[in-house]
Amino acid sequence: MHEAAFDFTDEAAINATFKRFDAQGIAIDILVNNAGIQHRQPMVELALADWQRVIDVNLTSAFLLPRGRRRMIPRGRGKIIDIGSLTSELARATVTPHTVAKGGIKMLTRGMAERSA
């Protein structure tokens, strides 16, 4: 098993990590997206910065990190596991950004699973 510490909301850090794995001859077989944070506050009081932080950690990172699949496709193998939340199905008044992001992960995963023509 190989692991690396990096900022998963930073595309440059993600690319550098995968390049380092490539240079070391490490092939990613299983990639797990399990990031998630909440910010509990009613929507009418929520600052844009707090919204953006939750969306970036919970959803944008799930878009960026699987770019490692580019290395899986030519090998014809590999798995990406996206961890969502029950809140993707249930609205909660004080965790709306989390709910939006986790619902987005569900559709992002479906979109990534589709094969391009």
Image (cartoon, rainbow, N blue to C red):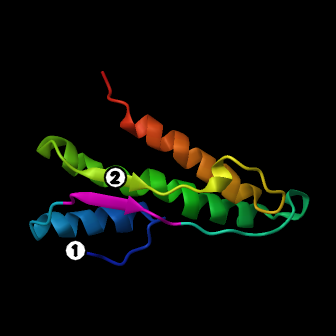
Q: Decide if residue 15 is on the left or right side of residue 62.
A: left
On the image, numbered disc 1 is attached to which residue?
Answer: 2
Magenta residue check for 30: yes
Write the start and end of the magenta stretch as one range. Answer: 28-35
How far across and how far down the image is residue 82, in percent? 44, 54
How far across and how far down the image is residue 57, in percent? 56, 64
Categorize mark 1 by other alpha carbons within 10 Å: few (<14), some (14-19), many (20+). few
**Amino acid type, mark 2:** Ile
Task: Give the residue at x 64% y 65%.
Answer: 53
Task: Give the residue at x 62% y 47%.
Answer: 103
| Closest to the observer, 85 or 40 | 85
Q: Quadrant of the C terminus?
A: top left
Q: Is residue 79 above or below residue 10?
A: above
| Closest to the observer, 75 or 9 | 75
Categorize mark 2 by other alpha carbons within 10 Å: few (<14), some (14-19), many (20+). some
Label drawn at residue 80: 2
